[in-house]
Image (tube, rainbow, N blue to C red):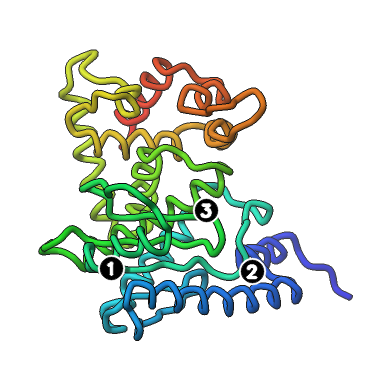
Amino acid sequence: MPRLSLSFALLLAFALPAFAQSPDKAKDDAEAIKKQKAAAAENLKTVKITKPTLVETDGLLVYAEMTEEKLKPIAEAAQKALDRGLKDLKYGEKDRRWSGKLTVYVLADRTKEYTAFVKLVEQRSGKLDADEMQTHTLKGQPHVAVTAAPGAKTADADLKAEAMAAVVAVLVDQKAGASVPTWIHTGMGKAISYRAESSGRLLEAHRTKVKGVITKAKAGTFKASDIWGDTKPKDAETLTVSLAEYLLYGASAEALEKFLGGFRATDERQEPNVSTALEAAGWKADDLDAAWKKWVLGIK
């Protein structure tokens, strides 16, 4: 049998899917997808959506009460975010914890669909935050659900952006092995989504804005710790995304993994928080602040 050259072997390796399946894994996934579709149908009936549209991608089951023509671009964008999230969060085979596909519910009507879904399907009590536009869980049948602001003039674009960010958020929690703070979901969700968006327009606009904010700010105006603290700085969302970018692309992969792992509860970490995550990564808040700002200003 002829031997493969090193270059050809490498080409073959990169040409294979990122998560090549064994026959047993493929069978397990097929069975899981069947159950996921049945569960989705029941969940949608609960919120009075009886004839949903389904767009299925390589890794997602995307449902909505809208035409396939409108839903397909949202599903394709969410799949791009999934692919980019797996890459940028340094996923390996051992990191994948669900069989089948991730279910994405696109619930355009926030009051009738999304709020009902959160209350009846997720059985979450209490009043929703006014700015909540997405939710996710890894329990039971893993899913994300997204919505748009009532009366939004850019609802389709908003739903696409939320779906992309929500898919990344569930990947972040899975990688961490815990539910991480909302600012990390927001920051990493948008940072990775900007890179998954093919035109590069959103990423370029973000880079320009954050560089301007940090360049023009007076020394001591804000610190990284303000992002997870009680007092939010001006341009908080832009800075949150930027700090998440540094964690993803500026810090080492080992430090990022330790940081996310620092949110897992252990005997030593009964109530994990940002402080325990920083400690796990070997970071001090002020040092992280300085490294982040230096990294931003060094981006060409």
Label 1 neighbour load within 10 Å: few <14, some 14-19, many 20+: many
Which quadrant holds residue 241? top left
* Residue displayed at 35% across by 46% down: 191
Tell me how far mark 1 sits from mark 3, CA to CA.
32 Å
Which residue matches tag 2?
16
Of the image marks 1 and 3, the number of the one nearer the N terminus: 3
Percent across and percent down for residue 87 are 52, 53
- Secondary structure beneath dot 3 equals helix
Of the image marks 1 and 2, the number of the one nearer the N terminus: 2
Labels 1 & 3 near each other (Cβ < 8 A): no
Tell me how far mark 2 sits from mark 3, CA to CA.
15 Å
Label 3 neighbour load within 10 Å: few <14, some 14-19, many 20+: few
* Residue displayed at 53% across by 31% down: 259
Percent across and percent down for residue 144 are 42, 60
Q: Nearer the viewer, mark 1 or mark 3?
A: 1
Tell me how far mark 1 sits from mark 2, CA to CA.
39 Å
Amino acid type, label 2: Leu
